[in-house]
Image (cartoon, rainbow, N blue to C red):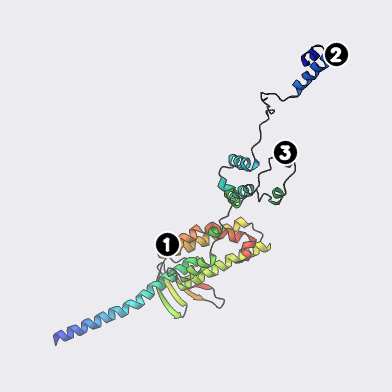
Amino acid sequence: MKKSFQQLSLVFFLSAFFVASAPAAEDAALLKDLTSVIALLGVPCGQVVSATKLKDNDHIATCNDGNRYRVFINAEGRVVAEKK
Amino acid sequence: MFHTKVLWMPAPRLAVASFALLIAACAAPPNAPVAVREPSLSVPVAAPPSTAIPAALAARAPSTAANPAILEAVEHKPSPPPAPTAVTAPTPKLAAAPIKAVTPPAATAQVVKAVPVPVTKTAAATLDMKALENRLKQTNSIGFMTKIALKNQVNDLLEQFREYHRGRLNTPLAALRRPYEMLLQKVLALLQDGDPPLANEIVASREAIWGILADPVKFATI
């Protein structure tokens, strides 16, 4: 009984680990992308530490220097970073 | 009787007889043969032209193989007749066999090799802008929104060049160099870690890209 419980918990733990790691990789890429975009736009940020998705290609980025920007693609197809 | 008649001939008759004998002696053929010598020709006789011309040509040309056409034409020349009268008049065969092209194909090939045509390296120097653009779109080192932002900035710079070539921009061409360099630096900063080969290609194409942007003819093809 104990062995089966331990095996089951191990299976759950490993599955949770792999499932959780997948979006983390995507988050890292997103954070890097947002950091690059904000740097390209020439606004002060440093490094984006967190991002909140509003919709497709529309995020709120929080920088390590405390600045927050809404980064999105407008109707004209241009990437815009609005300071929040 | 006879003897006495002879002894008793008068003097004039004796003189005539002796004279007749003398004439008969001169008319008879001589016993010793007389050597008749033909006049010796001091002028050297020229060799027949059929054998002299190839020798002359061989002396001129470094190799007879380079002048096969000429030798072929010469070989077909007939030797002139030995009679002196025939030498002055040109034979019809000589006129019928004209000398072929002076410059045989081998010689022209040598001339062509000696004067190489300056071949400009257009193929190698031509910048494949389309290939660079595709690689930039497909690279994984730049995120989606970053690519969009780069595309916006590239379009802004191209619009400036377009205005300049139309004559609507008051700034000189050198003033556009700085924004061009700045944009290139941004692209390189994004690529240098994630896609170094593409970054190196863009660095190598820096001047070529500027050349396309600065030239109105080439810029129109973009």
Instruction: Count residues near mark 1 (Cα–Cα under 10 Å), then give few for <14, some for 14-19, many for 20+.
Output: some
Report whether mark 2 lies on the same chain as mark 3: yes
Toward which corner of the image does residue B222 lie, by quadrant?
Answer: bottom right
Query: At 72% from the left edge and 41% from the top edge, which residue is drawn?
Result: B87
Question: How many tags in the picture?
Answer: 3
Circle number at residue B12: 2
Tell me residue B95's x, y (percent). 72, 49
Sequence-earlier tag: 2 or 3: 2
Q: Which residue is mark 3?
A: B84
Marks 2/3: CA distance?
60 Å
Is residue A43 at all visible to an observer of this figure? no
Sequence-earlier tag: 2 or 1: 2
Marks 2/1: CA distance?
149 Å
Left or right of B24? Residue A22 is left
Tell me residue B190's x, y (percent). 45, 64
- Chain letter of mark 2 equals B
Q: Which residue is mark 1?
A: B196
Marks 3/1: CA distance?
90 Å
Sequence-earlier tag: 3 or 1: 3
**Mark 3: which amino acid?**
Pro
Dot 2 and dot 1 residues touching (CB under 8 Å): no
Left or right of A23? Residue A39 is right
**Mark 2: which amino acid?**
Pro
Is A84 rendered above or below residue B173? below
Dot 3 and dot 1 residues touching (CB under 8 Å): no
Is B97 rendered above or below residue A81? above
